[in-house]
Each structure stands twice: as C-alpha cells, then as structure tokens.
Image: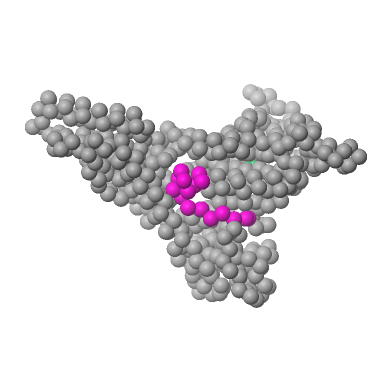
Amino acid sequence: LIGITVDKALDFPGWYQQILTKGEMLDYYDVSGCYILRPASYAIWEQIQQWFDAKIKGLGVQNAYFPMFVSSRVLEREKDHIEGFAPEVAWVTKAGSSDLEEPIAIRPTSETVMYPYYSKWIRSYRDLPLKLNQWNSVVRWEFKHPQPFLRTREFLWQEGHTAHLTVEDAKQEVLDILDFYAGVYEELLAVPVVKGKKTEKEKFAGGDFTTTCEGYIPQTGRGIQGATSHHLGQNFSKMFNVSVENPLGSDHPKLFVYQNSWGLSTRVIGVMVMIHSDNKGLVIPPRVSQYQAVVIPVGITKKTTDAERSNIHASAKAIEDRLKKAGIRAFGDYNDNYTPGWKFSQYELKGIPIRIELGPKDIEKGQVIVVRRNDSRKYTVQLNELETRIPEILEELQRDLYLKAKELFDTHRVIVEDWKDFVPNLNRKNVILSPWCGVMECEEDIKDSSAKKDDGEELEQDEKSPSMGAKSLCIPFEQPELKQGQKCIKCSRPAIQYCMFGRSY
Ligand SMILES: O=C1CCCN[C@@H]1CCCn1cnc2ccccc2c1=O
C-alpha cells in the first residue's frame, strides 16, 4: 500500500476516491453506483447507529422492519409525491426465467409500505403517538454521476415515521430529531452544520415542511444536505386513512393524525471524510473511529538484542492492554518486518487518530510519545498518567477537528445584499446569506443567473453544468436582522427573510 498520489486541492474527486480505497474504508463494486463498506467505514456507521438509536429510544421511538418490496399498486397510491421520483424506482420484473405477474418495486423510501399498516393499527387516540424507525437500506436508481457515500444507488440509512394526535406534538418532534441530527454531525463527526427550513421548491413535496442540517465542503465551497426531518401534516394520513375516533365523542368527525418522517444516511461518512481528511490519507474523529490509538515500538535496530526487543514488545503490549482496559479502542503493531516509518505512513493513511511510540529511551524514562494524526502535534505522556492523558488528548483532537471545520464554514458563509457581489462570492467558495422574497420563480432565477462568470459572462462550454448555479440550501433558523424596507437580493420584491444559497452536491 503506497501513499496518496493525488493532491486534495488539485483533483478533489480523484483524491476522495483514493483515500477511501487506500484507507480501506470502501471498495468499488461491479454494479455501477454500488460500493462495499469495509470494516473501517462500517464501524463508523455503527457508532452513529448506537448514538442516534439511544437518542430516539429516549423519545419513545421503537425500531421495526418492513419488507423491501413494494407492489406498484401500493407505491403509486401517492401520485404527486411519486411523480418526480418515478425514474429512480428500481423494479423486480422476473424470478428466474419467468416474468412476474406484476412488477415489484424495491423501496426507495418506506412511506407507502408502512402507512397502510399505520391505518390498520391506529384505531383510537390511545394508540397515539406511534413512533417507528427502520435501520435499513433503500435503492434509488439515480443517473447522476455516482459518488461513494454521497450519491449511491443503494445506501444505508434510518427512516423514522411517526404519527401524532396533535400538530404541536408532531412539530416539536421534528425539531427534536433535527437536533439529534446536528448532534451526529457536530458531536460525533466534528462537522459543523446550519439548521434551517427548506424552501417550498427544495422541500419534500409530499410533506408540509422540511427542516434540514446543511454542511459545507471547504475544498469545493459547496453546501451539502446532511439529514432531513419532515413534518408531513395530514397529507399522508388523509391519503392512507390514518385516523382515530374523535376523543370528544363519536358524533365528532374522525381525526386524521399528524405525521413526521425523518432520515439520515451513510452520506454523513462522505461529508466527514471530505472535510477532515488530507493528502496523507484519512483523518477520522476519535469518537467514531474504529481504532483510536495504535501502539508502535520504535528504536529497534540491528544492534538491539533479542532480550531488549522482546522487552520493548512486552512493554508496548502492556500499554495496549492498559488502554483497552481504560475503554480506548487501541491496537499494537509489533510486526518487525516493517519499519516504524512505514507503519507511521500506513496508519496516517488509515486515519488512526493518535499513534503511541515506545522506544528503549522511553521505557527508561517511563514515558511514551503520542503523535496526533490531524496535525502531527507531539505529546510526552508519563506512563503513570496514561489512562488520564490519552482520553484527554483524544477529546482535544475531536474538539480541534470541529473548531477548524467551524472556522472554515463560518469564514465562508457571507452576507450578500447586492446582486453584483453574489457570483463573485460563489466563485470564492462561499455560501451566501441573502435577503430574499421567498418567491419560487425568483429562486429559479437566482439559480440560472448564478451559473455565470464573475462579470456575468457565460461560463465556458466545459464549465457549464447544472450544479454551477446556486440553489437555496435552507432558510436558517438563526436569521440576521432584516433592515426596514430591505429588498430581495435578486428581484425588486420586498425581502421576507434571509436565505442561505450556494452551489451544492
Ligand atoms: O427524506 C425522507 C426521510 C425518510 C423517509 N422519507 C422521507 C422522504 C423521501 C422522499 N423521497 C425521496 N426519494 C424517492 C425516490 C423514489 C420514490 C420516492 C422517493 C421519495 O419519496
């Protein structure tokens, strides 16, 4: 395994592919748009699952499992919510050599699978709230260029689907879940996000409103949607007749429940890699890393006697065992066929958060040398402080990764109130907060008008692409002060709010 041969700043897609494969997170598969998640990335997904699962169980959500197959009759129950997505639906049409009576879809999401059963199971208001979640995979046969973790034809996610008696109860949960999503990003993955509401154009059409966590990729200056929590209102409950007898009595009309649905996928791993990793390979935040520390004996040379060598190995092994006992996910590499230098670059490639070096001098002094993966900062740790200092160093690393990413996001999120400054800021890798009228046609105009050069000239033919226009990313919950009589950034209508715009994934 040699190092990364592509520079992150020069060929971002090539770099991204290389660090994932050489870092042993993922491998390519012969079905286009599908990838193999190897242990290093699956372990990150497991950490996310454990954390998020505990949070939603705290809200009374229960996990369940529904079939992955959806009959066309059922899938097309909801015409308008499906229409935009129909091209992405994958269908099973044969079993063996014989055709199926009627084609069966593979779930792209589970609303139409689950809600007929919500209708069957929810009879009285005492059956509410019903809160189910699935940890599963879904298939969306996208034709846009696939990218590992970010856009794949099958992906792992969780999809939560809840039914509530009151709209207040439902809307509160939408925000509670969004906070958990922000927690996955900021506390586990050390990735800062902006929380907000999607515009009417960008929201889930089947729902009432969509809330979202928006991330930022410094290398490309693009926003990226991280996780969404939708309030569905009564749209689906009216369609699937998910209703309860009115608590006020049977002479009152039946009540259609208020629903939410919310999802976070393995895309979050791609966001984390793109933000933290560098030209030496992966950089994995300690809280989610499969291994947090690697112990490497050093100072073993041809002159080292067998007795000294086995003493160094024994001391290193003892340190590894102490760390494991202290709850640190540690391992040691005692393979003398490789030099320490080779091992250092190997574990930098894999993004192991810290390496712990132990040589003859260190044994004499009762210390180890600790080196951080993100910035190679060195620490000398006394052996008798190991169980205290190593967790501290890991937490400090976690925090420094977050602070660096936050600094980059904050310094590349600019307020723009004059259209002439809009495109130049996009081209300086900024996402933009602008006063906006809220009108969909204006949003489309902003997208078309921003796929331009700084001076408003058309882009070169090879630069043109749909993703060069700025989309609305979200209407941030945290709003700058709107000035009296403030005009929309693009049209002459009055601005009603600030909206975050940017090129995106
Ligand atoms: O986001 C979420 C969170 C989890 C539960 N589902 C909602 C909404 C999914 C929207 N969606 C997204 N792609 C699709 C693709 C094909 C068919 C239907 C759909 C579809 O309904």
Q: Looking at the image, which residue sits at the far left?
A: 303
Q: Residue at x 39, y 41 (%)?
A: 286
Q: Residue at x 71, y 43 (%)?
A: 259
Q: Quadrant of ligand 1?
A: top right
Q: Is residue 309 left or right of residue 385?
A: left
The residues colored magenta run 183-198
- How is the protein colored in the picture? one colour
Q: Verify whether residue 308 appears in magenta.
A: no
Indicate whether 86 appears above or below 338: below
In front of the other: 138 or 128: 128
Q: Is residue 237 left or right of residue 249?
A: left
Residue 72 spot, x, y in % from top left: 73, 35
Indicate whether 49 appears above or below 180: above
Residue 132 spot, x, y in % from top left: 65, 34
Q: Looking at the image, which residue sits at the far right?
A: 251
Question: Can residue 221 be seen by looking at this rendering?
Answer: yes
Residue 335 spot, x, y in % from top left: 23, 29
Q: Within the image, what quadrant is residue 137 found in?
A: top right
Q: Is residue 29 left or right of residue 335?
A: right
In front of the other: 178 or 282: 178
Q: Within the image, what quadrant is residue 21 found in?
A: top left
Q: Is residue 485 left or right of residue 154?
A: right
Q: Residue at x 17, y 25 (%)?
A: 310
Q: Quadrant of the N terminus?
A: top left
Q: Residue at x 66, y 47 (%)?
A: 172
Q: Verify whether residue 192 appears in magenta.
A: yes
Question: Can residue 446 be seen by looking at this rendering?
Answer: no
Give the number of marks: 0
